[in-house]
Amino acid sequence: MPLAFESQSHGRVAFGFFNIESDMLLLEQLFLFADDFCASVVDLARGGVGTVVPIDGWRIRQPAAVGNLHGAIAGVDLSGFIGASYREFPFPARTEDFKQSPDGARTQTWMTETMARFGEPERIPLEWLATDSAVSVAEYEFDHVGFRKLIEYVERGGYPRYRDERRPECVTRMIRTLHELSAPWA
């Protein structure tokens, strides 16, 4: 479930997984896959200050086309992209089954095909800014602590955490590499 994170540019913003069967992340109206995010964070750390790494993702311009997360979870509002994802991958009947799938990448084809009805492809720039290891994700700027919190969220599997605490390989590789590089967000 997406959580509120503090950005330097836009105040509190929503970031995170929105469906436990998918590895797709949202940042407000931007959408990208976790494996692309992880690989780009590693490329950013390797490149150093001033590096810009584009991530292939999507932007949904109309809020109604994004959908209603809480309505979709409850099964009462399956509108927009988020609603379509819950129609295909419903919220689990048992609360104890509410865990992020470490195999969420298996739904990427379905998510990509469905996103084509709601959003526009966009190359989302991830940039290591010169200021205090700040990072921007498109127009959203995070100081190094704020960006570290985004990474920690992905590492945990967000809220509710990964099923059986099993992380996808892309996440494990990102965390290991950030520590090896002594990146400021590690």
Image: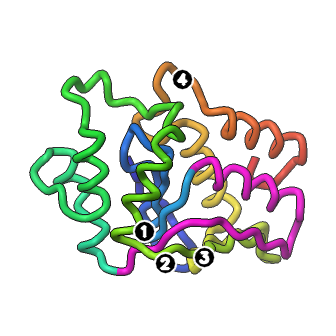
CB atoms at circles 3 and 1 under 8 Å apart? no
Would residue 95 be counted in the magenta stretch? no
Instruction: Tell me the residue that label 4 is attached to.
Output: 165
Between residues 64 and 146, which one lies in front from this camera angle? 64
Which badge, 2 or 1, comes first in the chain's sequence? 2
Contact between labelled residues 3 and 2, with CB atoms less than 8 Å apart: no
Q: Which label's residue is closer to the chain start, 2 or 4?
A: 2
Q: CA distance from mark 2 to mark 3?
A: 12 Å
Front in this rendered view, residue 72 or 181: 72
**At which x and y percent is residue 106?**
50, 38
Q: Secondary structure at mark 1?
A: loop
The secondary element bearing badge 3 is classed as loop
- Residue drawn where x is 81% and y is 58% of the image: 43
Highlighted magenta segment, given as a residue range:
34-61
Amino acid type, label 4 = Glu
* Amino acid type, label 3: Ala
**Three-letter code, disc 2:** His
Q: Earlier in the sequence, mark 4 or mark 1?
A: 1
- Provide the residue designation for mark 2: 10
Question: Which label number is shown at residue 138?
Answer: 3
Could you classify mark 3 by the number of other residues whose Cα lies within 10 Å: few (under 14), some (14-19), or many (20 or more)?
some
Residues under numbered marks 2 and 1 in contact, where contact means CB atoms less than 8 Å apart: yes
Q: Which residue is mark 1?
A: 28
Question: Who's the residue at 77% across and 75% down the image?
Answer: 129
Q: Which residue is more in the foreground, 172 or 150?
A: 172
Mark 1: which amino acid? Glu
Q: Residues within 10 Å of mark 4 (few under 14, many from 20)?
A: some
| Colour setup of the view | rainbow
